[in-house]
Each structure stands twice: as C-alpha cells, then as structure tokens.
Amino acid sequence: MSESAKRRLDMLKSALEPITPWLEKDTITEIMLNPDGKVWVNEQGVGMYKTGIILNSEAANRIIRLIATEAGMEITPDKPSLAAKLPHWGARVQASIPPYSVDGPTFNFRLPARRIYTLDEYVEQGIMTYEQAETMKQAVREKKNILVAGGTGSGKTTLVNALLHEIAGSNDRVVLIEDNLELQCPVENLVRKLVNPPELTLSKAIFDSLREYPSRIIVGEVRDRSAYDLISIWNTGHPGNICTIHASSAENALHRLNRLAQQAQPQFDFMPEIRRMVGAVVYLTEDSRRPVMRCVGQIIRLS
C-alpha cells in the first residue's frame, strides 16, 4: 500500500471511530445512519436497535466523502447517491446526501459474514429443523439446483455459505459470481468473479464460467434479465448450482425467476423449465419468536 493510500485509510478509520466497536463486532450485520444522525444496528440474535451514537451532518458527510474517494468515485448534490465498498471491513455501502436524502446524509453498511455456520448449527439454533437440514444436505450431495429465497436481511447469503460448507474437501471446481464479495467457499478448486456493469455483467460472467469447466456455478443474487442466462446454463447439463433471489415465499421465488427471465424473452413462459431444473427452493423469513430472529419458513423439493 502506498503512503498516500495508507493516509487515506487512516483518515477514514479516524472518521469511523464512533462506530468502530460495531464494525468490529462479529454478530453485527447492518449499521445504519438515519438523517437525524442516530446510528442503528442489526445484530444476529438480537434484532435492530439504537446504538446511542449520534453523528452530526459534518461527520456523516466526511465519512461518505472519504468512502467515495477510496472507491474512486464522487458524491455531490448532482450525484447524491453512492454504492461502494468499505475498505478494511469489506462492508457493502449504500449512502446518499441531500437533495436525494431530503433530511440529511444517510448510509447503510452491510457487513460480510465473519464466520461460516454449518447446517447442523442452523438446527442447534432453531433456524431449521433436523429434517430440513437433511433435505438440504441431500440436495447438495445430489447436485440439485438450489434457489435460496427471502427478503432483505433474511440471511440468504449466510445460508448459501452453509450449503457451500457441505462440499468442503471435495474436488469440485466451483465458480462464484457476485456483485459484492460475500460468499465463502471452502474448496481449493475455486474461481471467483466480481461483476461490475455495464461491461462485466452477470450474464457475461455466467457464460464465461461455462468455458472454465465448472462443477458448480454459484450466483450471489439474480435480480434482472440475467435469470434467462442462468436458466439456459441449468438447461445444458450443468447441475449443482446455487442462487439467491428476493421473494416472499418459496413458490413466489419460482414465479419471480420466471418474470425476470421474461425480461429477456417476454413471449416465453419459463415455468415448466424452471420446475424441471430447480431441485429445491428454501425460503428464509424473519421470526421474532426465534433466538436468532429468523428461520427457514419453507422448503419445496421439485425435480
């Protein structure tokens, strides 16, 4: 690291000092600054709460500007929105300033998982039943295509990491495709791709991966017409893949995948193909009655 880069990082760390304890805490998944200056966090097993920290507009704007500088971007009243990555901690950043954020600067830091939880630990923590865990283990062993569905913050990425843990020690050649580096795969034969539209799109990464002799292709999230490309590779003899999708139920996840694919081919109904190629859909939901505030709401087996 150059001296100038080190100075910039030191300045950012200094600006973030008031919230550093939460950045360093393993169980924190989200850190949120509201326009009123109050900092909230979301913590595994606890939920969302106020930290008691208040950042004034000057401090908040400084943090946001420093993050933008580190990302080689700028944030101004004419460009008031920032999507970037937080150096050192690796958090995904979404920030905005007035006039876009009407009442003041805001940011949200989504922190990557600090450790991989196994499916057995999911059972121990009451997130899923023993039968559900065995169903998912079998789906991974049999190289079924798995769709992991849920809302924002429901734990989709964490569950994918748990599923990937099931192939630890194998010789499978795994290609991970993400727009933010969050997945953790404990195999040696691994290729990671970071998409960055408009040039490096998810569709391009999916098709490029076919030339790299993959055993499994893991997609961090499908959210656009690239669902068509995903379905296409599933239909060409490449099983054992995993993908996440935002949806309100397991069944809705299948229909949403169909609607996304139709952005590329509006006249075509992909549902018969989807039901034939998807082996399992697991739906995660928030549940305040559980110690970890989330659970597997539903698993459906298909092909």
Image (cartoon, grey):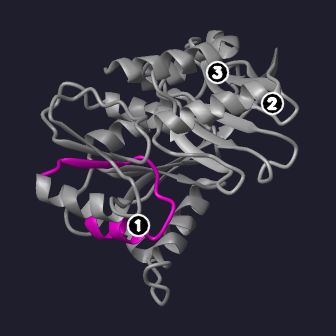
Q: Which residue is mark 3?
A: 44
Q: CA distance from mark 3 to mark 1?
A: 31 Å
Residue 186 x/y as whole percent: 27, 26
Q: Is residue 210 rendered magenta in the image?
A: no
Identified at 63% across, 38% down, the residue is 153
**Residue stretch in magenta:** 213-233
Identified at 62% across, 20% down, the residue is 28
Q: Look at label 3 and name its amino acid.
A: Gln
Q: Which mark is residue 226?
A: 1
Q: Is residue 289 visible?
A: no
Question: Relative to 218, does residue 90 appear above or below in the rendering?
Answer: above
Q: Tag 2: Cα neighbours inside 10 Å, few (<14), some, or many (≥20)?
A: some
Q: Look at label 2 and name its amino acid.
A: Ser
Identified at 34% across, 39% down, the residue is 138
22 sits left or right of 185 in the view: right
Q: Is residue 220 rendered magenta in the image?
A: yes
